Amino acid sequence: MAAVKICGVTSEAAVDAAVRGGASHVGLVFFPPSPRHVDWDCAAALAARVPSHVGIVGVFVDPDEQLVEQAAQAGRLATIQLHKTAPGKVAHLRRLTELDTWAAVPVKVRADLQAARGYVGAADRLLYDAKTPDDAALPGGMGLRFDWAVLDGFVHPLPWALSGGLDPANVAEAIARTGAPLVDVSSGVESAPGVKDVDKVAAFLQAAAATG
């Protein structure tokens, strides 16, 4: 059965729904332009509701050291997830925090997967996410999906996860099609940007569990 990360939680109800439904991870976004951004107090309050068997992932966009260190403390992070961050900086933040480190690889075409190899030795896991337009304000969480066929036959250089455009209606197909060991959802379980729908969260987790 694929593990599931419910990303961009901003409310206690969303955290509770994720935990109740069997999520392996919940994600806290530390990026002010995002509608899912949480401040230190909110991060601490949400983290306090997460049991020890569920990993808390801090999501960042090319962050500086101070931000990551403050977030790791406030949110009791087990993992850092880095978007638009070069391999060298990913490796540095991994050494600095000593936390499990995921590197996002934006994907649209097969050639984009070549960037994954640059993170060997720098990250612990790759997150394949749909590539957003160059002028987009956010690197993810926009409901975009890439063609899963580009993953066919690709030899993953690290453990990996699938993200981008997943929702309760397609997650079972995504897992069956790609063999993803972990799936990551954000906008696909929302009623509005940044507002998780607890029924959609439950449906997503149920659909993912049914593939096991």
Image (spheres, rainbow, N blue to C red):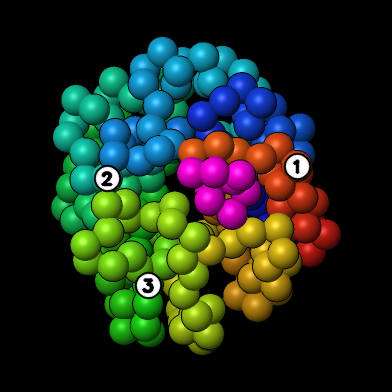
Q: Any mark on residue 42, and which?
A: none
Precedes in sequence: disc 2 or disc 3:
2
Q: Disc 1 designates what residue?
A: 199
Q: In this view, does 136 lie above or below 92?
A: below
Seen at 62% across and 29% down, the residue is 15
Q: Distance between the residues labelled 3 and 1?
A: 29 Å
> On the image, numbered disc 2 is attached to which residue?
61
Which of pointers 3 and 1 indicates the residue nearer the eye? 1
Where does residue 182 sit, x and y in percent of width and height?
59, 56
3D distance between C-alphas at marks 1 and 2: 29 Å
Answer with the quarter of the image where residue 38 lies: top left
Mark 1 or 2, nearer chain start: 2
The residue drawn where x is 66% and y is 40% is: 197
Kind of residue indicated by mark 2: Val
Secondary structure beneath dot 2 equals strand
Visible residue check, residue 169? yes
Q: Which residue position is annotated with label 3?
A: 107
**C-alpha span from label 2 to label 3:** 16 Å
